[in-house]
Amino acid sequence: QVQLVQSGAEVKKPGASVKVSCKASGYIFSSFDINWVRQATGQGLEWMGWMNPNSGNTGYAQKFQGRVTMTRNTSISTAYMELSSLRSEDTAVYYCTRRGNRGYGEFDNWGQGTLVTVSS
Amino acid sequence: DIQMTQSPSSLSASVGDRVTITCRTSQSINNFLNWYQEKPGKAPKLLIYGASNLQSGVPSRFSGSGSGTDFTLTITSLEPEDFATYYCQQTYSTPPNTFGQGTKLEIK
């Protein structure tokens, strides 16, 4: 079955960077885009960007342009999301998701989430 | 960017009730509208894609409808496990993939 398994919780200081990994299994990793979505405590879902694991092409939400980088290692079916210049407002659960192939851009599988806490 | 207006923001209902959640977009998105369910401490789960298509494994008491700018998620005969937060998402005009603000469905 399809699984996306993310790396563990992180605690970072303001100004630092964090890199979250997302290991895919149960399907051909290069065939489906990976998107990243975050959720601050008590808040809604916020889309951050996407990556095509085959080409490495990416697209980022304007809010995160210049601070986020999405990469992958196809040999180990793993996607990465790195967010730099962290501030307290970046404290959130970060999810990787797979965009499905039904033609509607749906996010059909999600990782379990990674809590990133930014605190001095 | 396309704006999403989801309503209500919260809703109280009883087991067995029928509930409807609405999502309105600032411009037509055809049927590029998806619905997700989120429970505390868990990742969101895809319920409906393409406005009205039930994701595999999702109970048939969930249904979606609409096209253009107005969409609804309906749950007929609420079960205890349905109390959760629901989000709509448009994928017509991306980036960004915009989510609605969420609807928290609580037990009355």
Image (cartoon, rainbow, N blue to C red):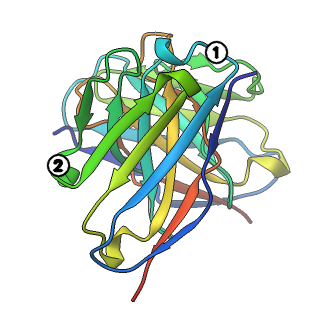
Left or right for B78, reference A99: right
What's the residue at 74%, 29% (across, down)? B61
Where is residue A64 drawn, in percent x and y?
22, 52
State the SS at label 2. loop
Q: Is residue B54 left or right of residue A22?
A: right
Q: Which residue is mark 1?
A: A27
Point out residue B103 in the picture as x, y percentages from the top left corner: 52, 54
Q: Amino acid at mark 2?
A: Gln
Label 2 Cα crowd, 10 Å radius (few <14 / some 14-19 / many 20+):
few
Q: Three-letter amino acid code at disc 1?
A: Tyr
Circles 2 and 1, Cβ within 8 Å, touching? The answer is no
Identify the image quadrant of the N terminus of chain A: top right
Say which of B101 and B18 sits in front.
Answer: B101
Estimate how packed mark 1 is, as few (under 14), some (14 to 19) or many (20 or more) residues with alpha carbons within 10 Å: few
> Which of the 4 image quadrants contains residue B78?
top right
B16 or B92: nearer the viewer: B92
Q: In the rendering, at what x and y percent does residue A72 appear? A: 42, 31
Disc number for residue B86 = none
B3 is higher (above) or lower (below) than B42: above
Residue A65 got which mark?
2
